[in-house]
Amino acid sequence: MTFSETMPSTASTQTTAQATAHAKINLFLHITGRRDDGYHLLDSLAVFAGAADHVTLAGPSDTMSLTINGPFGQGLEADDQNLVLRAARALQVQASPSFNGLTENFRLELEKNLPVSSGIGGGSADAAATLRLLAREWNVDQATLFPIAEKLGADVPVCVAQRATRMQGIGEILAPAPILPDAGLLLVNPGVGVSTPDVFRAFAAGGGIVERPEAFLPERWSTAQDMVADLNATTNDLQAPALSQCPVIGTVLASIASLPDCLLSRMSGSGATCFGIFPNPESALNAARILSEQSARLGWWTWAGGFHHTGSST
Ligand SMILES: C[C@@](CO)(OP(=O)(O)O)[C@H](O)COP(=O)(O)OP(=O)(O)OC[C@H]1O[C@@H](n2ccc(N)nc2=O)[C@H](O)[C@@H]1O
Ligand SMILES: Nc1ncnc2c1ncn2[C@@H]1O[C@H](COP(=O)(O)OP(=O)(O)O)[C@@H](O)[C@H]1O
């Protein structure tokens, strides 16, 4: 983590620790099989955007507690089901034998900037950020976080790593991904939550798994154009089923595709957030400016910038 992610100082003398929970984007998502428990096997290239939530240790407390603020905080309960508290408690159990005078309970604060249930793994990223943050505080080795992460959700392990990763299985098999170019990224969410189970159900009902050769990925992409040339041979298998549940996704995809310099327009995860790839962050910001009148009128959330290039622990 960078210094600014981990140790911002408050106005008072107290020092707080913070971790950044970057949005996960599935640049492609192929469904390759199904497990006996009904979960679908994936082959996906997960990358991270500059857009992020923030989790802060706001001070010691009698119990592990959570407050939520930020533009998407309303409607998200700070209860035992919140992935921040679930992650904190899961790690607490593992770390407890070695507390030795360390603070065991914290007031946690979540700044919720990412739309909820939107295919960019905000809850998973929050859980992963909480694990990384408390692991630092309690001197827990980051490598031991992965088994805990897996139990919290299919996307949590990749969010612990928080670097471009090829994910397989249901998200527990992680392999290195190509080094990414300095491409531009535009995210657009139409403000409609999509149910992940419903989208997987619609996928199965719509014909299910397509046999195809495994996607080819090089060691690096030097330009956004090179990356998109390879991504054009891939798809998001959940896009059509999500569109059948939530037709506005089609409008979002077409709007992104019509923007100047857009190289690719696609949905992330189970939706409804869609992304556009642009030659560089400046062209993505320019595209967001052009879209701003339409997105304000329709109540769409947008974010423009680049990839988060650094892994979580650097
Ligand atoms: C589709 C992906 C791709 O990265 O992203 P999101 O749309 O969530 O961002 C993930 O695999 C989502 O993982 P996650 O968000 O943890 O899913 P969960 O809440 O555990 O799953 C909700 C439900 O979706 C179905 N499900 C989920 C994942 C999977 N590989 N196969 C499934 O069939 C199951 O019915 C499961 O009960
Ligand atoms: N901190 C959190 N942020 C977002 N969602 C959360 C959080 N904790 C629990 N959830 C629940 O997790 C589910 C998935 O949320 P999210 O990760 O935003 O979806 P997606 O992976 O589709 O973007 C939602 O039903 C939400 O209520």
Image: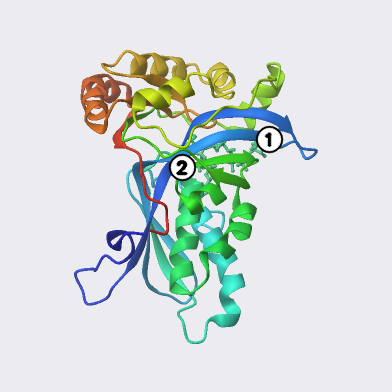
Residue 97 at x, y percent in the picture: 60, 81
Mark 2 vs 1, N-terminal side: 1
Residue 109 at x, y percent in the picture: 38, 60
Q: Is residue 285 left or right of residue 93?
A: left
Cα gap from disc 2 to disc 1, whole angstroms: 19 Å
**Dot 2, how many residues are within 10 Å of its Cα: few (below 14), some (14-19), or many (20+)?**
many
**Dot 1, how many residues are within 10 Å of its Cα: few (below 14), some (14-19), or many (20+)?**
some
Q: Quadrant of residue 48?
A: top left
The residue closer to the viewer here, 103 or 63, is 103
In this view, the residue farthest toward the bottom is 101
Quarter that holds the N terminus: bottom left
**Is residue 78 visible in this depiction of the protein?**
no
- Residue at horizontal 27%, vertical 28%? 284
Is 46 above or below relative to 238? below
Is 15 above or below relative to 253? below
Q: Is residue 171 left or right of residue 56?
A: right
The residue that disc 2 covers is 164
Q: Looking at numbered disc 1 in the image, what kind of residue is underneath it? A: Leu
Q: Secondary structure at mark 1?
A: strand
Do tag 2 and tag 1 residues touch (Cβ < 8 Å)?
no
- Residue at horizontal 61%, vertical 33%? 43
In this view, the residue farthest toward the right is 36
Residue 219 at x, y percent in the picture: 47, 37
Instruction: Determine which of the numbered discs, if any, sits on residue 133 in the image.
Output: none
**Is residue 147 visible in this depiction of the protein?**
yes
The residue that disc 1 covers is 41
Nearer the observer, disc 2 or disc 1? 2
Q: Looking at numbered disc 2 in the image, what kind of residue is underneath it? A: Ala
Q: Is mark 1 within 8 Å of ligand 1?
A: yes
Is 34 above or below relative to 142? above
